[in-house]
Image (cartoon, rainbow, N blue to C red):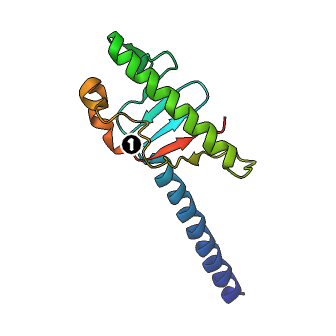
């Protein structure tokens, strides 16, 4: 009886460890710096820094606080938003169905630069977020 109990305990520990690894992998993926493109906003995430939100009209918020920008900065962000929305739509059109509605990685076509190369110089709030520029995700919601 003791041997059976020890065997069951060992199997339980193995199963728990496997689930724990799956959870850790999920957390690592969620915490990666990324730009998520959803229907009505673009969210730039880099933990532990606050999120940057870009709206369709070119307005920008950091932690729900609107940041004052000049007209050229609004135009730049509005253009970036539009290009990212086109990429999102193209990505979701080609993506297979997912009942869990997980985000899909956006592959930027050669020659297209949805994130302007001078974004950091023109909008300095993005300077700590450059590592997110290569990880674009299309949100299905």
Q: Residue at x 27, y 24 (%)?
A: 122
The answer to whether residue 10 is above or below residue 126 is: below
Would you call the spot at circle 1 few (<14 residues within 10 Å), some (14-19), or many (20 or more)?
Answer: some
Q: Residue at x 63, y 71 (%)?
A: 15
Residue annotated with mark 1: 132
Residue 77 shows in the view:
yes
Quarter assignment of residue 13? bottom right
Q: Is residue 7 left or right of residue 78?
A: right
Q: Quadrant of the C terminus?
A: top right
User: Which x, y percent locates residue 85?
Assistant: 56, 32
Q: Is residue 119 left or right of residue 94?
A: left
User: Which x, y percent locates residue 57?
Assistant: 49, 15
User: Which x, y percent locates residue 29?
Assistant: 49, 53
Q: Nearer the viewer, residue 52 or 15?
A: 52
Quarter assignment of residue 66? top left
Total numbered labels placed on residues in the image: 1
Q: Quadrant of the N terminus?
A: bottom right
The answer to whether residue 71 is above or below residue 14 is: above
Q: Nearer the viewer, residue 8 or 129?
A: 129
User: Which x, y percent locates residue 32?
Assistant: 43, 48
SS at mark 1 in the image? helix
Residue 63 shows in the view:
no
Q: Residue at x 44, y 47 (%)?
A: 135
Q: Residue at x 54, y 26 (%)?
A: 41
């Amino acid at each position: 009886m003791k041997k059976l109990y020890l065997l069951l305990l060992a199997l339980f520990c193995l199963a728990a460890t496997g689930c724990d690894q799956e959870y850790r992998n999920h957390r690592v993926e969620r915490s990666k710096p990324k730009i998520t493109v959803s229907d009505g906003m673009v969210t730039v995430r880099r933990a532990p820094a606050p999120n940057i939100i870009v709206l369709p009209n070119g307005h920008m918020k950091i932690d729900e606080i609107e940041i004052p920008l000049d007209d050229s900065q609004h135009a730049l962000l509005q253009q970036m938003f539009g290009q990212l929305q086109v990429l999102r739509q193209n990505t979701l059109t080609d993506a297979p169905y997912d009942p869990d509605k997980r985000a899909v990685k956006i592959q930027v076509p050669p020659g297209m630069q949805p994130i302007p190369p001078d974004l950091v110089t023109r909008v300095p709030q993005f300077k700590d977020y450059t590592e997110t520029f290569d990880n674009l995700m299309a949100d299905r919601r």
